[in-house]
């Protein structure tokens, strides 16, 4: 019997994960391959391994989050790191402290990895230039949410085997979505074709300069795609009136049972969460047999463990 | 470069290891082999089929990736950065006698990491260590229960094991 899988010898050198735009297809594939090795930690008798023993990870979140924040916290603790939870509301930021001062003060306590979510695009990058610790972007403005992009391609690769040649629709509020952007970079680099679908008011103005096609009708593409990723309508970010009513949006862009009947029988239905049930997706679809929404969450843990492990490895090589 | 074992000798050693394992482990216990990636994986598969044949019952076989348990993860690695791969053990290790298999036993650090990794998977009745080459140079208080070829190669030299499944041929050389 031959060895089952061969992973090419590859040297990971990034001590920060800021976005997927700057990563090569080879680097993305390496993270996914590494994540496979972390999956089993969560299913065995002792759900912990020692590679980050003695390291400190800070969850520095300036925006609300349940999935990402808890996923990073659990990933860090499964790797035996200590974790500090930082929230803006109960911190000195509310007394006027700047992002960099906050981070430098945390760093002075001897932290090793900062996981940051911030409303401003580029916040993670700014931080990575100013402190010595590793920086992992957990969402910055409308720019990137790299670990979500990674867990999405990981989930697709796991089910479909490859992304090469797949047609993937990303539907909804593209303009305000960092998930759409990270997904787009990861998916296209791995060989998939990405279609942004949504009303013109929710399409980024520079969409024509991105490696995607744009479609304003869900009905037009529903029969053709292999994967459909339904984004959440982010009411907290919407300005003006991008669509006349929720019912109208739902009528044209909601993933309904009726639309699912026209889709390929093995279409993968994804959603980054949290779902507005009945708005972008009917409950029967969200809980249906094509839905991989909960697998995405499970896989997110393995992907985040891999990312924390790899940035720490790169930091150790540079020490 | 000097060839210390050819394919016939490797086959002979594995056969001999299987015989010794059977003679020393009472038949009422369940045995399983688990190989340390990546050459130990191949050797564990071969040992498990030999044991299965000789015992007339299936001896399960698994593969252990010890990367996360290495004691040098936070040291600079040079070109050989460790890569995490999957652990594939499709059976319960509880109450089994686990034959841990590796190609070369040298410093003992891999065996230490493997024991820690195994114990996170459950509680075997016992862990026994079987190796193709037992090389002088231990840095930890660990020894093999079933050792094949004994080598006193100098610390500066490299003992390289090649196996058909992973390298195209069976051979052990000292470089």
Image: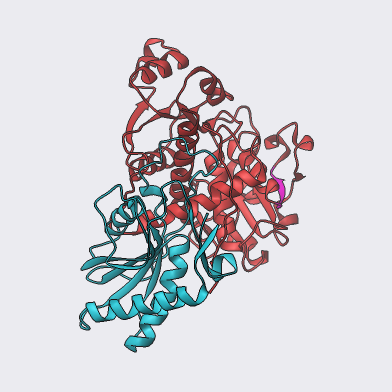
Residue A282 appears left or right of B104: right
Spot the residue most to the top: A96
Tell whether position B159 is magenta: no
Query: Relative to A100, is A181 above or below?
Result: below
Q: Nearer the viewer, residue A166 or B40?
A: B40
Q: What residue appears at the point 64 percent right and 59 percent down from the top-left corner? A: A162
Q: Position of residue B175 (x, y in %)?
A: 52, 54
Q: How many marks?
A: 0
* Residues shaded magenta: A191-198
Q: What residue appears at the point 61 percent right and 31 percent down from the top-left corner? A: A143
Q: Nearer the viewer, residue A261 or B164?
A: B164
Scheme of colours in the image: by chain
**Chain for colour red:** A
**Chain for colour cyan:** B
Q: Nearer the viewer, residue A141 or A317?
A: A317
Query: Relative to B11, is A229 above or below?
Result: above
Q: Nearer the viewer, residue B126 or B145?
A: B145
Query: Relative to B104, is A180 above or below?
Result: above
Q: Position of residue B58 (x, y in %)?
A: 36, 83
Magenta region, mostly helix, strand or loop?
Answer: strand
Q: Position of residue A123 (x, y in %)?
A: 54, 23
């Amino acid at each position: 019997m031959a060895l089952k899988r061969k992973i090419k010898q590859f040297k990971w050198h990034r001590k920060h994960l800021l976005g997927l735009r700057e990563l090569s297809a080879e680097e993305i594939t390496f993270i996914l391959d590494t994540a496979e090795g972390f999956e089993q930690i969560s299913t065995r008798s002792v759900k912990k391994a020692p590679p980050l023993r003695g390291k400190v990870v800070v969850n520095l979140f300036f925006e609300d989050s349940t999935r990402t924040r808890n996923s990073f916290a659990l990933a860090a603790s499964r790797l035996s790191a200590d974790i500090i939870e930082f929230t803006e509301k109960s911190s000195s930021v509310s007394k006027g402290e700047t992002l960099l001062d906050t981070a430098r003060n945390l760093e002075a306590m001897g932290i090793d990895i900062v996981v940051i979510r911030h409303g401003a695009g580029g916040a993670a990058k700014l931080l990575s230039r100013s402190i010595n610790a590793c920086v992992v972007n957990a969402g910055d403005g409308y720019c990137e949410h790299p670990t979500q992009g990674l867990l999405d391609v990981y989930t697709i690769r796991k089910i479909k085997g490859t992304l090469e040649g797949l047609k993937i629709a990303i539907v909804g509020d593209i303009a305000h979505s960092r998930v759409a952007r990270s997904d787009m970079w990861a998916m296209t680099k791995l060989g998939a074709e990405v279609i942004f679908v949504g009303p013109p008011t929710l399409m980024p103005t520079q969409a024509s300069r991105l490696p995607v096609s744009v479609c304003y009708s869900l009905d037009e593409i529903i029969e053709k795609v292999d994967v459909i990723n339904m984004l959440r309508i982010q009411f907290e970010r919407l300005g003006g009136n991008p669509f006349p009513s929720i019912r109208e949006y739902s009528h044209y862009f909601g993933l309904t049972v009726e639309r699912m009947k026209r889709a390929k029988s093995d279409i993968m239905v994804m959603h980054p969460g949290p779902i507005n049930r009945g708005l972008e997706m009917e409950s029967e679809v969200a809980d249906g047999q094509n839905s991989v929404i909960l697998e995405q969450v499970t896989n997110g843990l393995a992907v985040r463990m891999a990312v924390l492990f790899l940035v720490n490895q790169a930091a150790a090589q540079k020490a | 470069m000097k060839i210390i074992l050819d394919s016939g000798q490797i086959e002979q050693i594995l056969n001999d290891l299987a015989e010794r394992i059977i003679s020393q482990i009472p038949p009422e216990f369940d045995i399983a082999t688990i190989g340390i990636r990546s050459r130990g994986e191949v050797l564990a598969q071969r040992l498990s089929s030999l044991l299965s044949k000789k015992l007339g019952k299936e001896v399960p076989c698994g593969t252990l990736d010890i990367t996360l348990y290495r004691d040098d993860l936070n040291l600079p690695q040079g070109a050989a950065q460790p890569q995490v791969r999957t652990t594939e053990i499709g059976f319960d290790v509880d109450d089994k006698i686990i034959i841990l298999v590796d190609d070369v036993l040298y410093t003992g650090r891999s065996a230490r990491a493997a024991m820690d990794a195994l114990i996170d998977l459950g509680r075997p009745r016992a862990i026994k260590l079987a190796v193709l080459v037992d090389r002088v140079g231990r840095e930890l208080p660990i020894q093999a229960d079933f050792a094949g070829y004994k080598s006193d190669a100098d610390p500066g030299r490299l003992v390289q094991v090649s196996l058909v499944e992973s390298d195209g041929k069976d051979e052990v050389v000292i470089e």
